[in-house]
Amino acid sequence: MKHYGGCLCGDVRYEVTGSFENFFLCHCSRCRRDTGSSHAANLFSRTATLRWLNGEENVVVFHLPETRHVRSFCSQCGSALPTMQTHGRETLLVVPAGSLETDVPIRPQGHILMGSRANWDMELEHVPAFEGLPG
């Protein structure tokens, strides 16, 4: 299975070959700061491979010192991009779901780290929804 994605400005494009084993919505404070939103939506794979199709020189990898938190992004537009994370002997491909141009093949399996979610991230299903911009 092949998946394609890229950044907002189009400078970086990538291909993932293989399957995703997990899809989680992480509400930790680090992921909220990374995304500027209530949570990060990331796909995970221990077996899939990542290949940069163009713009690899624009990929910046930030590793928060003394943590396992790693984030890759486009140096031009700041969009989140896939990253390879190594923990001991295990390597994990982490793909921001929103960076994919192809359909996401699995549904989220759960919300994680809900104990540190934002105080405004509750009962959002009761907030009005609009098809376009509110008028």
Image (spheres, rainbow, N blue to C red):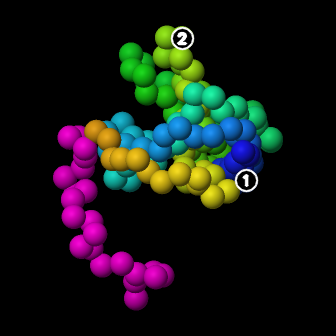
Q: Position of residue 7 (x, y in %)?
A: 65, 50
Say which label, 1 or 2, has the lower sequence index.
1
Task: Identify the residue at image location x=70%, y=34%.
Answer: 50
Residue found at x 41% / y 47% = 109
Residue range in magenta is 114-135
Instruction: Identify residue type, mark 2.
Output: Arg
Horizontally, residue 118 falls left or right of residue 23, namely left
Can you identify the residue that label 2 sits on?
89
Q: Visible in this render: residue 14?
A: no
Up the image or down, 135 lies above or below 76; here it is below
Q: Which of the 4 quarters of the picture holds residue 116?
A: top left
* Label 1 crowd (10 A; few <14 / some 14-19 / many >=20): some
In the displayed structure, would residue 70 be above or below residue 67? below
Badge 2 local density, few (<14 within 10 Å), some, or many (20+)?
Answer: few
Left/right of residue 130 with respect to residue 92 in the rendered view = left
- Amino acid bearing label 1: Gly
Q: Is residue 45 magenta?
A: no
Q: In this picture, is 82 found above or below 84? A: below
The mark found on residue 10 in the picture is 1
